[in-house]
Image: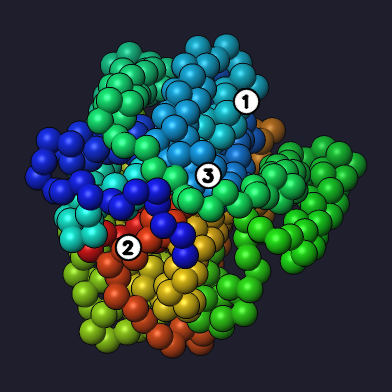
Amino acid sequence: MTEAVGAPDVRYGTAQARWIVVATVLGSGIAFLDTTVVNVALPAISDDLGTSITGLQWTLDAYLVSLSALLLLGGSLGDRYGRRAVYVAGLGAFTTASVVCAVAPTTGWLIAARAAQGVGGALLVPGSLAIIAATFHPDDRGRAIGAWSGLAGVASAIAPFLGGWLIDAVSWRLIFLINVPIAAVAIAVALRHVPETRSPEREPLDVSGAAAITLALAAISYAAIEHHGGASVVAGIVGVLAVVAFIAWERVSDHPMLPLAVFRSRQFSGANLTTLAVYAALNIGFFLVVLRLQVSLGYSALEAGASLVPFTVLMLVLSPWAGQLGQRIGARLPLTVGPLITAVGLLLLSRLRPGDHYATGVMPAVVIFGLGMAITVAPLTAAVLAGVSEGLVGVASGVNNAVARFAGLLAVAVVPAIAGIDASRSLASSIDAGYVTALRIATVVCAVGGVFAAVLVRETAPTTVPPHPSAFAACQDAGVAVGSTSGEQAP
């Protein structure tokens, strides 16, 4: 366990403390806004650029490929070269890519820019909470993280309304341009008020591992999304070989980005299998439900975004209670029941039909969906951390968040094709053809996550965030329309 250079001594309530929280919340807010609103903007993007369902899948997955692959490396870069410096660099890269997204003339340009956003996000995302952990006095760290979490939750609640309004009133392009002034303020505040911190140990970076896993995720995504016969087969083979090479390298590397030893814990592996299943279901659910609401049920972008607000509110209100419940009774029961309730919500969402009213058709399903996820998230964090020794909690949290991102990537790439959503059809007909099957697949996958927990999860741990800054090395991709992900619970 390494220590930041200089003892963290910023006290909560001081002017500097407030500026640090502002800088980290603004940076997080950019990620929250884009992650939430891009889903809502997909039909508008399709109409404007003539994007097929395949292009929409890439619009989401291009970001997730680079983010998932480089997330752990981004945290290491912050530890090595300075958390503020890497955070500011991430803000700059993310915002530059956002501008390219906003002016993209074709789907190909948009996909490339989204991949660049993921690279910026991999630098930006780990830094937000790491800065707080490395700068605030240990006695005040919990309050600072709580303030960050609350303000981040407000951003999550506002994002669907703001994004939907921008899409309907002006253009989907504004959801990317709005990042520019926010990032400019965040960079200015960070450079002026956030002290620089870094790890005293300058360990080598696992560049080879990052390159191998990036190739693996990109190739596997291509094989799953594209359907070009021999090219897809070759991409699949390359992806599998890259995964094998990544695992082999991580086994022999002196400084692996993914220490494989953590998976020797049955508890840790079981909690991550639950994460994989639940977040795969979550991502495919939101990807297709938002399309269904707009393409088939005639919702505007604002209405589609607003329809999911009950999910966000339940997550914000009930997650602390679920964390306390997990501390009292253990993580196993919540992690069994939560995914099963989430699966019921997905099953109800699969029944959405044109003509359904929001109050009787959409909202009850969204509420049950949100209730299940609220019960699941905080105990899932506890189960992950309980599966490793205290010295590995940072690695455990980072790996778990990378698993959650990978789950979303894989689900969006694979499930539509399995469900019969055909890119050769119009967006409306392709969604109508495969929506029900895709949501039912998500339902089963989510329920399987509860089974994993029932069989493999045995222990729990307090859901307060560990005091070591590396515990946040891969936190905070904001999930999908959630505002919090596994491993991000504040005390």
Residue 467: assigned label: 2
Which residue is outermost to the right? 230
- Residue at which label 1 appears: 112
Q: Which is more N-terminal, label 2 or label 1?
A: 1
Query: Neighbour class for label 2 at 10 Å: few (<14), some, many (≥20)?
Result: some
- 10 Å crowding of disc 1: few (<14), some (14-19), many (20+): some
Q: Are marks 1 and 2 in contact (CB under 8 Å)?
A: no
**In this view of the protein, which residue sits in the foreground, 256 or 294?**
256
Label pair 2/3, CB-CB below 8 angstroms: no
The colour scheme is rainbow
Q: Tell which circle, 3 or 1, labels the residue nearer the N-terminal end.
A: 3
Relative vertical location of residue 189 with respect to residue 225 in this rendering, above or below:
above
Q: Position of residue 291 (x, y in %)?
A: 45, 39
Q: Amino acid at mark 2?
A: Pro
**Which one is in front, 210 or 378?**
210
Q: Secondary structure at mark 3?
A: helix
Numbered badge on residue 80: 3
* Left or right, residue 51 beside residue 267: right
Q: Residue at x 24, y 59 (%)?
A: 138
Residue 125 appears anywhere in the view: no
The quarter holding residue 351 reads bottom left
Image-based side of 7 in relation to 172, left or right: left
